[in-house]
Image (tube, coloured by chain):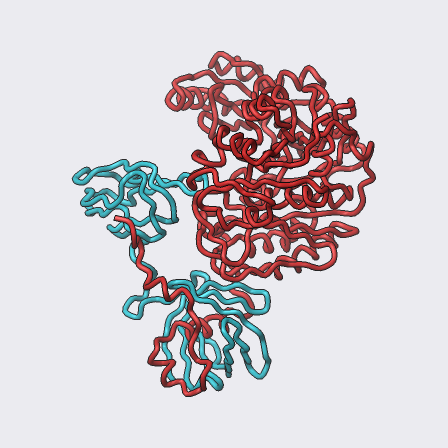
Amino acid sequence: MPAVRKVLIANRGEIAVRIMRTCRAMGVATVAVSSEADTDALHVRLADEAVLIGPPPARESYLVVEKLLDAAKKTGADAVHPGYGFLAENARFAAAVGDAGLTFIGPPPQAIATMGDKVAARTLMEKAGVPVVPATPVLDPDPAVFARAAEGLGFPVVIKAAAGGGGKGMRIVRRVEELAEAVAGASREATSAFGDGRIYLERYLERPRHVEVQVFADTHGTVVHLGERECSIQRRHQKIVEESPSPAVDATLRAAMTDAGIRAAAAVDYVGAGTIEFLLDEQGRFYFLEMNTRLQVEHPVTEWITGLDLVREQILVARGERLSFDAITPRGHAMECRLYSEDPAHGFLPATGTVHVLGEPSGAWVRFDSGITAGSRIGVEYDPLLAKLSTFGATREEARTRMLAALRETVLLGVITNRDYLAAVLAHPAFASGATHTEFLAEHFAGWTPPAGRHGDVAAALAALALAGPAARRDDGAGAAAALPTPWESLGPWRPGAGTR
Amino acid sequence: MSVRKTVLVDGAPRAVALDGRSDALSARVGDGDAFDLAVAKDGAMWRVTVGGRAIAATVVRDRDAVWITIDGEIHRCTAVADDRSGGAAGGAHSPEVTAPMPGKVLAVRVEAGQEVAAGDPLVVLEAMKMETIVSADAKARVREVRVAAGAMVEPGQVVVVLEYL
């Protein structure tokens, strides 16, 4: 049995920190890796040892398999935890870790590879009796052929390009009369975008919810579910608010979805923590979307409602032990908000800067998973996720209001974040009522601008005071404490583009 | 002291007038009512009294911005140059095309002298795994390209200078 006494965490940011905390609680030693941009980062400071693995760009550091394996060898680590993102769903990395005689804390490479191939995954899921979105094979671009197929699937339908991606060649069709033009348009667009005009038809789901099932499997044949999470609040297909249980899932639906999740995991001989993502339509029908063969960003909401530490279970499974539980008894309701360095008022453009002040929320049933501290530099190299805030309550409403209070306590000065946007989402009546779906933000929050706040005028006055020139300060006459301390003045005046040509 | 300044609070312009000493100011913002304001500073911690009520604020300055948190609210404030009513250089319909975000120049799609139409891509930027295309907002001739592929840019930095046709 592999021992797992010293784990190299092949990641950075909040997830590296979160994994290290569990390792420490289990008496497992930790090795951090860092790029040159992260030498002072929280995950480096928390680790027992740290290895510098290269320049800031991830493809020259966090994504270089040989450097990670060298770091493991050099430090005597016996296991590697990939976190999420970077190499977490790279089957070749998982295999290389095993070939180097180390334990990969994650599923077998074959399971990663199968689920990473969308076509293979869909075929396998159909065989395992997991529902997939009804679709046709590639069809002749003949309106009559498409009309017959559409009748079979039921409107609305969506025409998709076989070589597709990024919405190109896609056409949503609600009535049979629209088909002829849509077929011609989609085929033309697919040809020009991909050099491949093949198209097919799929049932279109109106305003679906994103509901996923957490599964866990050990090497003794046990496969269990840990309930569902709803992650419908998404911007640009990226989740920003997650919760468990889903307000749309009752006991009957939960039984069906978690059964399907277990069947999906069993079908790929899964080991470890995994997530099966489904789309849930307004009629309560659900369809397999994909399986994430790793720990999810939003795993804390599952930890809240189950009382488990999922990283601990991952390590137990990697050691060849049994899961510490065989079924869960979920209780209460949990929510998570993702704090991103981005500007929701300007198309969610990434924001950068230095974290000058960080106020972390705390209190009963509040958890803050963060990879930053005051002084952290937020650059352009990595994912803009700064921290995850999660709350728990006996009811959904209790978790929601607790989240609003905790968001207010989450104060980051120096970098623009989506905090106020998250608060606006949580405060929206449609969210409060549980009427969430993947078009929620587009429907309710297009053109959002930051709230003026109750103290906007006072802030304006304070800012004017802070920005007033030395002449105004000199003739203030109010005593010694007049000058605003500006440690950053030593950086000199800021000019756009200083330092570049 | 007497301060007359237009401040952008979270992007929205507010005209501020302050008169008196910082421990006894009369403040007026926009066309709102004047209010009494007193400020006692201890480093970044400011004790603020507004209309007789004390509130703690944290105020830090970072380059051209002042970040303020007060009663759970966060406001990012920047000065508007006194001789202009608008925002920063560039912006909407300006021949000086600027980067909307910090990042790396992935590709430059034009060269000096070239004619472009509205919507034509000029420069492709990347930050945090996201690509953004900076495009021409009107028919123009490219007068100057100020960045090269691989360069890092700051928000507001001029990347291309156009000459509208």
> Residue B29: x and y, percent?
45, 75
Q: Nearer the viewer, residue A404 or B48?
A: B48
Q: What residue is at 56 percent from the left and 23 percent from the top?
A: A96
> Residue B69: x and y, percent?
53, 66
From this view, report whether residue A428 is shown above or below residue A108.
below
Whether residue A33 is visible here, answered yes or no, is yes
> Residue B164: x and y, percent?
20, 47
Placement of the N terminus of chain A among the 4 image quadrants = top right
Q: Nearer the viewer, residue A481 or A366?
A: A481
Q: Quadrant of residue A267?
A: top right
> Residue B70: x and y, percent?
55, 69
Q: Nearer the viewer, residue A173 or A120?
A: A120
Q: Quadrant of residue A466?
A: bottom left
Q: Residue furthest left?
A: B113
Whether residue A247 is visible here, answered yes or no, is no
Q: Nearer the viewer, residue A181 or A360?
A: A360
Q: Determine whether, in the image, residue B21 is placed left or right of residue A206.
A: left
Q: Quadrant of residue B112?
A: top left
Q: What residue is at 74 percent from the left and 37 percent from the top?
A: A249
Q: Determine whether, in the image, residue A432 is placed left or right of residue A453.
A: right
Q: What residue is at 70 percent from the left and 52 percent from the top?
A: A391
Q: Which chain is cyan?
A: B
Which color was chain A given?
red
